[in-house]
Amino acid sequence: MLTGAILAGGRNGEMNGVNKALLPLGDERMLERQIRMMKELCEEVILVTNEPRLFLPIVGSSIRIITDFIKNQGPLGGMHAAFTLSRHTDIWVVGGDMPFISSEIAERLWRIKQQQRCMAVVPALYGEVYPMHAIYDKRCASYAMEQMEAGGNKVMQLLGSVAHCMIEPEALGGLEKARSFTFQVNTPEDYEQALGYIGRTTI
């Protein structure tokens, strides 16, 4: 069984204070699109946010909402909370600013984790590593805690402390699909680009 975890704790400074997960994309919000994709694969979906009241009216009881155990630790703090509270051993982690996550890609990553028996399976595309949209083992929680207690909060440092597999595009079903699922909305220009992508089969 697989848990999906959406990290929606960003400050959204470049989006005029609007939480990116709540931006509309077509006839649904970005978060709703992510939940829909995750439910194709995941038995459980978790939203990690320090603003639960913002999301409760939207998601209701359809998913679990949790908050960081340790505040102000960025994505690593959210990942630690998700790892700790996940009901399943394997967790698919994405950022709340990723509108085009792929359950198909996640399933391939998950299968690789099961085959290779590593603690994390992370896409490595076009010279960049994407620790979001990766599959992690629940046991990574203790490593994340150790890192935060030592004063570090970088996700790449976590990967350096656990056995992980880096996955190239060829293992993910083609370059076009691999280009889309890593897309992030960080600026208003990114958002406009995302709106232009809606309705396309590939990006």
Image: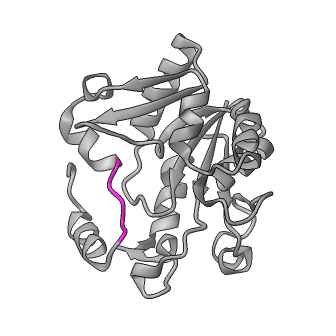
Residue 135 in percent (x, y) is at 54, 34
Count of numbered circles on the image: 0
Residue 119 in percent (x, y) is at 61, 24
Answer above or below: position of 105 versus 149: above
Answer above or below: position of 24 versus 185: below
Q: Outermost residue, front direction?
A: 150
- The dominant secondary structure in magenta is loop
Report the magenta residues as a range: 182-186
Residue in front for this viewpoint, 141 or 138: 141
Q: Outermost residue, bottom direction?
A: 16
Residue displayed at 49% across by 83% down: 18
Residue in front for this viewpoint, 199 or 111: 111
Q: Quadrant of the N terminus?
A: top right
Q: How is the image coloured?
A: one colour
Answer above or below: position of 33 versus 139: below
Residue 200: image quadrant is bottom left
Residue 191 in percent (x, y) is at 31, 73
Residue 87 in percent (x, y) is at 78, 39
Residue displayed at 46% across by 35% down: 106
Residue displayed at 22% across by 69% down: 193
Left or right? Give the position of 101 relative to 86: left
